[in-house]
Image (cartoon, rainbow, N blue to C red):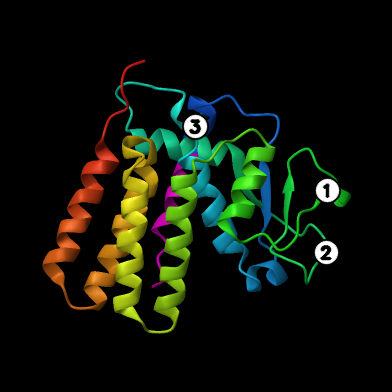
Amino acid sequence: IASHSSHRKMIAASLLAPAVFSLHPIGLRICKNSVCRKAGSADTLDSLFALAAASDQANSNQNGGVALATLQEAFAASRVQACGCLGGCGSGPNVVTTDGGPSDVFHDVYKPSSCAALLDHVGVTVPEAAQRAWLRRMYAMRALRSNKGGEALALLTEALQEASSLKGRAAHLLTLLLEQRADVHEMLRDAPSARDDRERAARLRAMPAPVA
């Protein structure tokens, strides 16, 4: 299922990030040039963004009155960005730290565990439950590409169960998973379930951050 909503949220969050978070000296840049794009760098960008949004640090700056998911997205946008060619074409998706040079490029980055390790390398700690949830989401997307809607639905449900253990700390991640499961429900012609998931996602997206 192709959806551009997550990319629109990344753009919106990048505009908010400087106003909410001071920019960390080290972040991650993901190549979006043609060769890496064909190797799946858009998926790597999505993974790094979603995992960063569920990190301990994304939930450390409470700002009452601002939606929790919005704060998490702003944090992720302050640490994870797309960039042009990093060299090493053919070994992508390629990622580099914002203070790194040509010799500091990480190649073939796509697994949630690799993404979490890179985030940890720049001081962003991702809970294991978020990693497990995102891995199931990746398997669900693979199932969809093979036209296995039922399998994808089951995997997204498992992903939601994993992420739910984090509660509001994973507001962005839970919203994303609910919206994607709603897409699958619609593909399987289950409109009531799709509507329920979209309503839950909207409530999560509006959840305010607690006052520090």
Q: Amino acid at mark 3?
A: Asp
User: Label 2: few (<14), some or many (≥20) within 10 Å?
Assistant: some
> Which mark is on residue 55?
none
Chain-order first, disc 1 or disc 3: 3
Q: Nearer the viewer, residue 45 or 164?
A: 164
Classify 10 Å Cα crowding around label 3: few (below 14), some (14-19), many (20 and above): some
Query: In the rendered structure, which amino acid carries the disc numbered 2?
Result: Gly
Which region shows up in magenta?
Answer: 1-14
Residue 9 against residue 158 in the figure, above or below: above
Q: How far separated are the C-alphas under marks 2 and 1?
A: 11 Å
Circle 3 residue: 56
Residue 112 location, quadrant: bottom right
Give the image location of residue 79, x and y in percent: 60, 39
Q: Secondary structure at mark 2?
A: loop
In the image, farthest residue toward the top? 212
Q: Decide whether the magenta segment is chiefly helix, strand or loop.
A: helix
Can I make out residue 149 in this image? Answer: yes
At which x and y percent is residue 68?
35, 33
Location of residue 179 with respect to 9 vertically, above or below: below
x, y (%) of residue 163? 36, 48
Q: Earlier in the sequence, mark 3 or mark 2?
A: 3
Tell me the quarter of the picture where residue 145 sits: bottom left
Q: Residue tagged by mark 2?
A: 88
